[in-house]
Image (cartoon, rainbow, N blue to C red):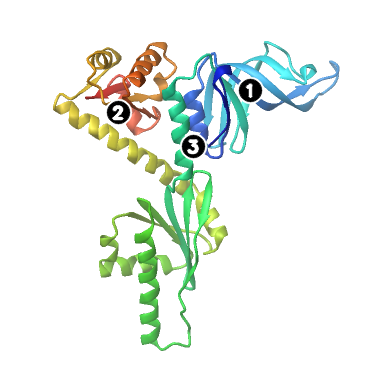
Amino acid sequence: MKIVKFYESAGSLKLKVDTLEDLWTAQRIIFANDIVKSESERKFKSSESDKGELKKVMITLRVEKTELDKDAMRLRVLGKIMDGHPLEYVRINSYHTLNIAPGDIFEIIKSEWHNYIINVVKNAVSDSKRPRLGLIVLDDEKALPAYMLGYGVDFGNEIYSKLSKRMSQKDFQEQQKKYYDEILEMIKGMVVDTVVVAGPGFTKDDLKAYGETSGAIKKISKRIIFEHVSNAERSGVYELIKSSTFSRILERERIRAEFRLIEEFLTSLSTGKSKYGIENVSIVLDNMEASLILVNDSLLGDPAVQALLSKAEEERVEIEVINSMDEVGEQLHAFKDIAVIS
């Protein structure tokens, strides 16, 4: 995600989204009655008998609701058209759906931008620059490392096995061991919690078996996942990224971070240092005892919650917004969607 322009005095924030997670972030910050401006397509008929043709238009609409389609990688923003350009291709006050996809630039206009909402955006921008997963594609000839960033892939330098069929069995096994050791050392040096190792054939399986037998994998304080791709080239990395398995891995990484927060809340709840529900959270805030607030994104459009979070900002209380659609969000929902840790 990238902030293109922020005109605070005009209440206007222009964003560029790059990933599915960016679309999820956008959905969290677009509320009913916000104004969203984006390029779209409208069917224009010059006459009643005309079948019509699709025209590109810049649409400004007042939001009624949003829908995130993960499979199609689209954020649908539904509402009534307030303005459009060219004007002859739009009907003011008619209903329209903006389809926002990775690569799109769009504008959100609010009467007021609360800091906790801006922080959701800033955190998404920061996350897009931070390595989220380590990737290694390999075969019996070479291994290619890469980092999955929020906005794309950062490739490293290949390492080569230097194996040859002309080698004696002893020399081949010794060189293969060196190759595997070098890959395991590469994994150890990656500044991420999880590394996905993928490739064709049996090399990845042999590496796993070697690492487990030698005890090297146990010494690496990372989660290592082994997957299949058709080659050990850059195209193999992109093949991995496009897979449904990889999408689930990314989703689990985000949820793992949220699980740590909910576990902190549950632990402190047993000692009386946590409260939940908007009334109890408000009391803790009034007593200046709050250090961290967890809130489901489904509550962000609630005026009472907005007032409470604005007050929390004034008191410099940390605010963590949770995805209400995942497991952690469901857990927090059981505690009235909002909780505070003292």
Q: Label 1, on which residue?
A: 37
Q: Position of residue 140 (x, y in %)?
A: 46, 72
Instruction: Give the mark count.
Output: 3
Q: Nearer the viewer, mark 3 or mark 2?
A: 3
> Could you tell me the amino acid type at mark 1?
Lys
User: Looking at the image, which is closer to me, 205 or 2?
Assistant: 2
Task: Please tell me whether mark 1 sits on a helix, a strand or a loop.
Answer: strand
Q: Write down the quadrant of residue 321 in the picture.
A: top left
> Which of the marked residues, 1 or 3, is nearer the chain's N terminus?
1
Judging from the image, what secondary structure is the residue with disc 3 in?
helix
Q: Looking at the image, tell me whether mark 3 or mark 2 is earlier in sequence order.
A: 3
Residue under the point 45% across and 56% down: 135
Q: Which residue is mark 2?
A: 331
The image shows residue 128 at horizontal and vertical percentages of: 48, 42
Residue type of the residue flagged with mark 2? Gln
- Discs 1, 3 touching: Cβ within 8 Å: no
Q: Are marks 3 and 2 in contact (CB under 8 Å)?
A: no
Quadrant for the C terminus, please.
Answer: top left
Report the mark closest to the observer, 1 or 3. Answer: 3
For label 3, the crowd category at 10 Å Cα-Cα, with few meaning under 14, some 14 to 19 and many 20 or more, is some
Residue 125, label in figure: 3
Q: Give the side of residue 6 with respect to residue 327, left or right.
A: right
- Mark positioned earlier in the residue sequence (1 or 2): 1
Q: CA distance from mark 1 to mark 3?
A: 20 Å
Q: Which is nearer the eye, 32 or 245? A: 32
Q: Farthest residue in the left direction? A: 271
Image point 63% across, 17% down: which residue?
A: 61
Above or below, comparing residue 239 to residue 340 in the picture: below
Provide residue 155's location: percent of width, then percent of height: 51, 58
